[in-house]
Amino acid sequence: MKKKLRVYLDTSVISAQFDRRIPEMRFFTNRFFKAIEKFEPYISEVVLAEIGRTKDTKLRNKLRNFASSFNILPIDEESRVSADEYIKYGVIPEDYEEDALHIAIASVNSIDYFLSWNFEHLVKVKTRKIVGMVNTIFGYSSIEIITPAELL
């Protein structure tokens, strides 16, 4: 049996399922979720915390219900240390520690693909290169940081 690719879904991917503001993003997110059985999907406690801060109660409940079907990775000390390294090396600005934690949790848990719609800090060449460098230094496998559209 062929091994399923392990994918980490950050909060932007979960929320894109319900966001009507950018039709293209929602279209590709829906296509990805229709093919989800091909993958082994993961989220983390960081995703759950971010969802918990959603002000709109109805949306927050939809997001929680949707996210409950995925494997949940914990925030552990190794992930916190790795997140600090990403910040130290300039991958993620210090004010966005949760973005660094997303990447660290995925890296520490040997996830194959990190999926996000966050083009500001996550899905960009600089982030991919420096994360690859830091992961090599600390003995973690490489991780591809891409959008759901790129994985289809």
Image (spheres, rainbow, N blue to C red):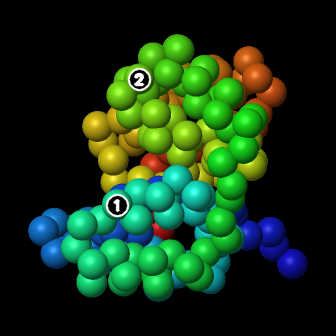
Residue drawn at (50%, 21%), measured in percent from left and top?
87
Side of 40 where 69 appears, left or right:
left
Q: Dot 2 corresponds to which residue?
A: 94
- The image shows residue 23, relative to residue 44, as above or below, that is below
Q: Nearer the viewer, residue 79 or 9?
A: 79
Side of 152 where 119 appears, left or right: left
> In x, y percent, where is residue 91?
46, 24
Q: Quadrant of residue 61?
A: bottom left
* Residue 110 to residue 2: above or below: above
Q: Which mark is residue 103?
A: none
Residue 55's place in the image compared with 69, above or below, is above
1 or 2: tag closer to the N-terminus: 1
Q: Furthest-top residue in view? A: 89
Q: Residue at x 46, y 49 (%)?
A: 146
Residue at the disc numbered 1:
53
Residue 28 showing in the rendered view: no
Figure quadrant of residue 42: bottom right
Q: Quadrant of the N terminus?
A: bottom right
Residue name at image x 62 percent, y 38 percent = 104
**What's the residue type where badge 2 is placed?**
Glu
Identify the secondary structure beneath mark 1.
loop
Label count reads 2
| SS assignment at label 2 | helix
Compared to residue 2, the image places residue 5 above or below, namely above
Residue 73 in sight here = yes
Of the residues shown, which amino acid type is indicated by label 1?
Answer: Arg
Q: Which-is-in-front pick, marks 1 and 2? A: 1
